[in-house]
Image (tube, rainbow, N blue to C red):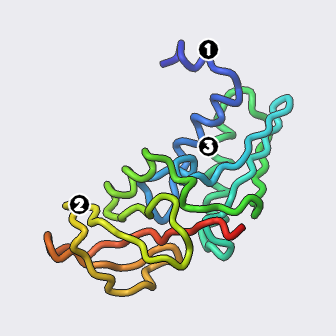
Amino acid sequence: MEAVLQSMNLKEKILLALKEVKDPEISSVSILDLGMVEEVQEIEGSVIIKALPTFAGCPALHIIERDIKKAVSKVEDVKEVKVDFVFSPTWTTDRITEEGKSQLKEFGIAPPPANHVMGEPWSIDCPYCGSSYVTMENIFGPTACRSILYCKSCKNPFEAMKPVADMN
């Protein structure tokens, strides 16, 4: 592993560190796999991370900022870290990687459908058994980005991440 790290440039090392920064509400998925990292700028050890909030009013932004700074500060040759939350481009659920979708399922959250058109109905499969025989129990889940559903096949309640599409 040490030899691999030695062969990486600083930006690659920073991205590797960001892969370890987990969403505070969904501890199985990284902010990279959620598609929250828009840009990494590095100039002579000064690093600026431009991150996209999943929702403008997300109460976890200060925790995410702290965790980004902590992780990136540990990278050799990084002298300072600044985190800027930006709102353009808009974060959408299409930014979630395939690995991120898999990690959401492992956590018990159904990932959002790809390329969803806002206003159209969306299909949700149970993250536990894969069944599409599910009912929406409450569109308003524990956070603004999730809904509560029930699988009629395996009888498990679960959450689903709401699809968020670019409105432009």
Residue 130, which numbered label? 2
Query: Label 2 to label 3, Cα distance in Å?
Result: 35 Å
Q: Amino acid at mark 1?
A: Ser
> In the image, is residue 92 above or below residue 95?
below
Q: Is residue 40 above or below residue 96?
A: above
**Which amino acid lies under the numbered mark 2 shown in the image of this protein?**
Gly
- Looking at marks 2 and 3 on the same chain, the residue that comes earlier in the sequence is marked by 3
- Element on which disc 2 rests: loop
Identified by mark 3, the residue type is Ala
Circle 3 sits on which residue?
71
SS category of the residue bearing label 1: helix
Q: Dot 2, crowdedness within 10 Å: few (<14), some or many (≥20)?
A: some
Q: Quadrant of residue 55?
A: bottom right
Q: Is residue 160 left or right of residue 135?
A: right
Disc assigned to residue 7: 1
Q: Position of residue 39 (x, y in %)?
A: 73, 45
Q: Secondary structure at mark 3?
A: helix
Point 68% across, 70% down: residue = 167
Q: CA distance from mark 1 to mark 3?
A: 20 Å
- Point 72% across, 67% down: residue: 168
Q: Is residue 131 left or right of residue 53?
A: left
Mark closest to the chain's N terminus, 1 or 3: 1
Q: Is residue 88 left or right of residue 70?
A: right
* Eye-nearest disc, 1 or 3: 1
- Observer-side mark, 2 or 1, equals 2
